[in-house]
Image (tube, rainbow, N blue to C red):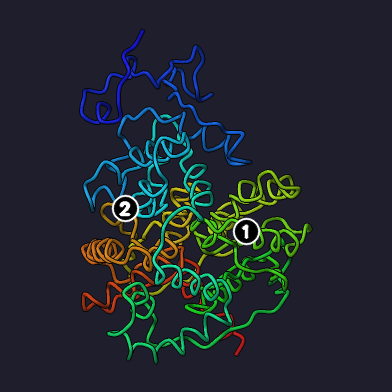
Amino acid sequence: MVESWSDEDFWNRPLQLSNLPFFHFPSTPLLQHSNTPFPLMLHSIQTEKLGPFGEPMAHAIQACVHCGFCLAACPTYGELGQEMDTPRGRIVLMKQVLEGSLPWTAAQPHVDRCLGCLACEPACPSGVPYRDLLSPFRSLAKDKFQLSTGERLRRFLASQTIPFPARFRFAAWTGRIAKVFRPIMPRALQPMVDLLPETLPPAQHWPLLTPARGERRARVALLTGCAQQVLDPDINTATIEVLSRNRVEVVVPSGQGCCGGLAWHTGDLRAAQSFARRNLAAFPADVDAILSNAAGCGSAMHEYHLVLRGTPDEERADAFRKRVLDVSVFLARLGLRELPIGSAQSRRIAYHDACHLANAQNVRREPRQLLRAIPGVELLEVADAHLCCGSAGTYNLDQPEIAASLGRKKAQAVLATGAELVASGNIGCLTQLRAHLARLGSSLPVRHTMQVLRDAYGSLRDKAA
């Protein structure tokens, strides 16, 4: 019989897994690819009372062995140095809340401070699917966490503007006027005006169908995103040009909308499901792939089966997500039809791994492969590449101090490479890097991988002219 340990005992006494009362060593390995049995964390979660998310959340908790490998990978642990602000600590907190032994509000500050960057997943030897726990938990906690009036207003404004390009553009333009009143604004609203860009690029629009140049090799449907359409619409233009040049026909479904990622990651399940259903209906079946050029969007669409778990649309969502690819993966698999021209001079490019590409989708090699295909490019790696830049959806709004610290460190790491340009595959990362490089007095160009590739080919519009 093992002794009973309190939670205080757990954190203060030596960790011997075989003696802990909430671990059980199964006779067969937890993971099919592993030859070593992992201990299962015992729990008393009544999954049937938690609805469709009960089972996946309990599985994620059960898989954690508290080994601590995730600590070094966790950006908030690096910033705050607290056990409760690590994946391991948050898993214990969420477990206790779901068991009913800890109030929701006790876990709130630590769960709120999680970036959702998923750096813990590739670092975890027991394969904890942390994403299956975090967003479902936040959806259950939405009405239980305590928020100030200002925080509630900020989240409402973000949810009603960012996912809708026309509203977001209008809000960004008019919001510049609000900067005059920043000193008298509630503190919770100040980050919204702080992050507004001084200028916005002109709106761009894309044809519903862009034909392949030459004999068609593939047909794809492209998600054009929401914030990206406002902050940097040229990313979509560059993506379509690169695909067309490589003999890919591009469909831009007219009925598409936001991927739902912002809603899903902040616990707004109803909105996330609405966005997901809209895209399930909008994207055609007669395409070879559904492409995303924003890491956060692609990651969110890969989770549609979880967003719609327990609904009549779950099976359709599971089939949909299996057709979703990042544009860099699609092009790397298809192969470039013709090599980019490049330039006469060599160019040093630093590549920044977007968390929701590298961690959520395991996409690291393909963007680098495409950039290295450009003659004269020397690709540089950024130190501590696994650490998040601090953008993380609305994290800049919700946790501005931590986000700013991470953004500054990432910008400093980029500058330390001596690069002439930095490339990445996510609009949030690009915006964060631009802001913090500017604060450091740097004018280093920040571009999407597709923009770099398009520029290396030469603009199709310029050639047509």
Q: Secondary structure at mark 2?
A: loop
Can you give x and y, in whole percent of width and height, for residue 174 in the image?
Answer: 46, 90
Q: Work out whether mark 1 precedes mark 2 in sequence or the reverse, and give the earlier one.
A: 1
In the image: residue 51, left or right of residue 418:
right
Crowd band around label 1 with a 10 angstrom C-alpha radius: few (<14), some (14–19), many (20+): some
Please name whichever residue, 442 or 274, is drawn nearer the observer in this view of the structure.
274
- As measured in the structure, the alpha-carbon distance from the residue carrying label 1 to the one carrying label 2 is 31 Å
Please name whichever residue, 452 or 311, is drawn nearer the observer in this view of the structure.
311
Can you give x and y, in whole percent of width and height, for residue 316 in the image?
Answer: 74, 49
Q: Kindly indicate the quadrant of the structure image that contains residue 437.
A: bottom left
Crowd band around label 2 with a 10 angstrom C-alpha radius: few (<14), some (14–19), many (20+): many
Which amino acid type is marked by label 2? Leu
Which amino acid type is marked by label 1? Arg
Can you give x and y, in whole percent of width and height, for residue 396 in the image?
Answer: 36, 67
Can you give x and y, in whole percent of width and height, for residue 213 in the image?
Answer: 68, 72
Q: Secondary structure at mark 1?
A: helix
Question: Residue 387 shows which numbered tag?
Answer: 2
Report the residue at 30% width, 30% height from top.
7
Q: Kindly indicate the quadrant of the structure image that contains residue 189.
A: bottom left
**Residue farthest right in this picture:** 286
Question: Residue 270 shows which numbered tag?
Answer: 1
In the image: residue 162, left or right of residue 287:
left
Q: Mark 1 or mark 2, which is nearer to you? A: 1
Q: Is residue 363 above or below residue 210?
A: above
Report the residue at 54% width, 56% height from top.
264
